[in-house]
Image (cartoon, helix red, strand yellow):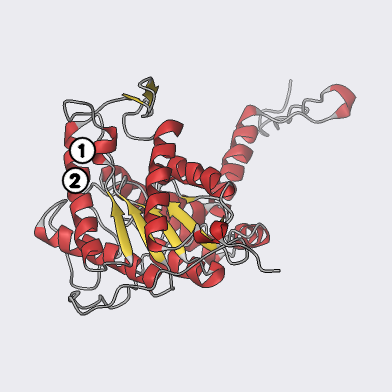
Amino acid sequence: MPDESHPRRRRRPPGRVGDGGRRLHSAGSAIVVSVLALGFAVLLNAPGLHKSATIQPEGWERDLALAFTEPLVSTSEAFFLDQPRRGLKAVLGRSEDDEIDTGIAVPEPPREPTTTTPPPRREKFSPDKKLRIYIAGDSLAVVPGQSLLRAIGGRGAMEPVGEVDGRIASGLERPDAFNWFTHIPKQMRKDRPRAVVLMFGGNDDHGFMTGLPPGREVDGFATASWTEEYRRRVGGIMDSVIRGGAFLVWIGLPITDDAEQTARFDTINAAVLAEAAKRPGRVAYLDTYFYFAGDDGGYAEYLPNASGTLVKMRADDGVHFERAAGDLIARKVLSLLNQRYDLTSWRREVPSD
């Protein structure tokens, strides 16, 4: 009989071996490895996750995302796991992607205009001295901007400084999403345009602002405190352009298929118009509302062109533009630029022998 005084040793089952002699691991081991790999990947990507959480709309989802990503960023930085991502971004020329910049530095506003303020000189441009134009804004600026680029291509006295600088989901309320207050002055210094075309506000019809000065609060969209701060930001952008030596055309927000949204856009347009009025001859406000309204004054998706044919002007979302609408806006912008600058007299000049 076996000696029962000593417990029998359990023999470890032989490891499973697959084809080719490879040792097979349990499903539990695979799950552990996957979880560790996922955690490592999350820590590597922590700065990007935190930026995505920060720029979300105000609400509990944003609060929850921030509560989750803030410790991740601290851990990632502590173990230098953020460095590979930062190095890759630097190589790609996108070092600013993960920065959360809410600083709003705007020039001091100008004094109220007086009747003695002389109008700017109507400078002359030609194929030998071209008017350099910078076009930028949120997603609403893209289609009109592309139309303007096409129109400029056939005019000898103008040239764009690049493609349309359109930034989706950006605006003046949320510099943490994209900071136009630092970006535009940088572009003015780099490209030195003499004309600038901007369109903002499509994402600004909310009450949540970031980048507020210390001690300042806003009470909600369209309140007196919100309007005061939004006008300060609009005026700051205008002054950054003016002091960079350029004339600014600011395209107003259009009527939309949502009456409540249109009313909010009207609030934004009123703020922009008020600031443009302080800067006569240097800022022109282009009111687009009635260009895209029907005979009854309401929203119209289709409008007749010069020959009376109905043309689709607005995108299916009821907010953005179709190409025909962009072309119409581009013609209006060019008209304002021709009023401000002499862009055509060079054609009438006869070269001397």
- Whether residue 176 appears in this view of the structure is no
Q: Nearer the viewer, residue 268 or 295?
A: 295
Looking at the image, residue 253 sits to the left or right of residue 124; the answer is: left
Any part of residue 215 in sight: yes
Instruction: Mark 2: give few (<14), some (14-19) or many (20+) Cα within 10 Å.
Output: some
Residue that carries the numbered disc 1 in the rendered image: 262
Considering the numbered disc 1 on the image, is that residue within a helix, a strand or a loop? helix
Query: What is the secondary structure assignment of the residue under circle 2?
Result: helix
179 in relation to 312, above or below: below
Which residue is identified by label 2?
266
Q: Give the Cα distance between marks 2 and 1.
A: 6 Å
Q: Residue furthest right?
A: 20
Disc 2 residue type (three-letter) = Asp
Q: Where, by quadrant of the figure, is residue 250 drawn?
A: bottom left
* Above or below for 42 versus 241: above
The quarter in which the N terminus is drawn is: top right
Q: Return the residue nearer the eye: 300 or 59.
A: 300
Q: Position of residue 11 (x, y in %)?
A: 74, 30
Contact between labelled residues 1 and 2, with CB atoms less than 8 Å apart: yes
Residue 304 in the image, given as x and y percentages of width and height: 34, 24
Image spot of residue 118 (x, y percent): 28, 77
